Amino acid sequence: MYHPIQFEINGTFPTTKTALYSKNLNGTTYWMANMTNVYEKKDRQILTHDGKFREEDFLAVFDEFCKANGLFAGSKTPSTVAEKCYTKAIEKYMTKNKIAAQVQNKSSHFFAMNESQMFKYRHYNDGELPDGYSINIPDSVEDVSQIVGSSINAKLVEEKLRRFPSLCVRKGDELAGFISSETHGAFAHLHVFQSHRGKNLGEKLEIGASKMAIENGIRPCKFIDTTNSFFLEKAKKSKMMDVVEANGTPLVFDQNVYSPASNYGAYQ
């Protein structure tokens, strides 16, 4: 939640406008952000709280938030980033209001640097790159074209590469890998092409992007799919970031995209 508000105040990503809604009920403050971007067809909502989560209270605030932003009205359906407890509550909200919508779900664990890790990596020297390789920002048209590929949101990806921590690794003039960031501040799309793997290039990209993030007041963080056991274990062993937990259990965050079902529209 912090990064989108920071980006809005600083004008970091001018094509995105973030509307913030909050309310305190029974000692808990619920924070809800609605992010609109001219290059995306769907608004994105980020939901969180400060205090003890109570489903009944959350649903009361969520109903006001939906009405304020026109969610579940007409053809406008949400695209949420929130802890699992929120998405379970939204399911009940849909059932209660007879909202028939399809849900595309991706569940992730969330990793973020703590203060000591940020201090360590701010000036971290991770050694030399293999012979012939270099790391720099993706500034050429060809770089952007290869990274964007056939994305239907090519302009959005291009803008994110320009405005958020993003790096390319090259061998000579050949693009070998890249890392980019999402509009909510988390790293995304860390990728090293097959012929260049096994050289620790992915870690060097992540360290370099983390330095860029820290220099720009962004706490380095990332989502990793709960089904991706290889990268989850690798992230835990690296000690570069901590997995976000509650009572010793890693939190599960859902990135849910809701779309109208065939009988959608009964809710008024």
Image (spheres, rainbow, N blue to C red):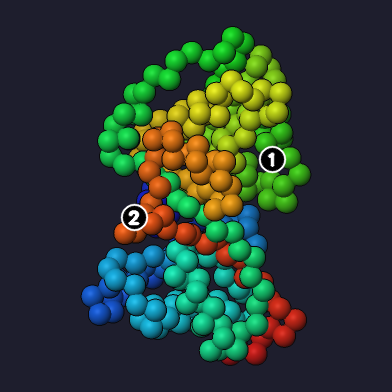
Image quadrant in which the C terminus is located: bottom right
Q: Note whether residue 19 is visible.
A: no
Residue 219, compared with residue 9, is above or below; it is: above
Residue at disc 2, secondary structure? loop
Query: Where residue 64 sits: x, y (%)?
Result: 43, 81
> Image check: 151 left or right of 40?
right
Please give the name of the residue rendered at 44% of the width and 40% of the height, measured from the top-left corner: 236
Measured in 3D between alpha carbons, the distance from the residue under mark 2 to the one under mark 1, in whole angstroms, is 38 Å
Q: Note whether residue 76 is visible.
A: yes
Q: Are marks 2 and 1 in contact (CB under 8 Å)?
A: no
Please give the name of the residue rendered at 36% of the width and 29% of the height, measured from the top-left corner: 121
> Image check: 122 left or right of 189?
left
Image quadrant in which the N terminus is located: bottom left
Query: Where residue 224 sits: x, y (%)?
Result: 53, 48
Residue 151, compared with residue 46, is above or below; it is: above
Most extreme residue toward the left is: 27
Depth-wise, is mark 2 or mark 1 nearer the camera?
A: 2
**Residue picked out by circle 1:** 148
Residue 246 image label: none
Please give the name of the residue rendered at 53% of the width and 89% of the height, measured from the top-left corner: 96
In the foreground, 217 or 233: 233
Label 2 CA crowd tier, 10 Å (few <14, some 14–19, many 20+): few
Residue 28, compared with residue 73, is above or below; it is: above
Residue 248 image label: 2
- Which amino acid type is marked by label 2? Gly
- Which amino acid type is marked by label 1? Val
Residue 49, compared with residue 60, is above or below; it is: above
Residue at disc 1, secondary structure? helix
Please give the name of the residue rendered at 38% of the width and 43% of the height, measured from the top-left corner: 242
Query: Where residue 149 sits: x, y (%)?
Result: 73, 40
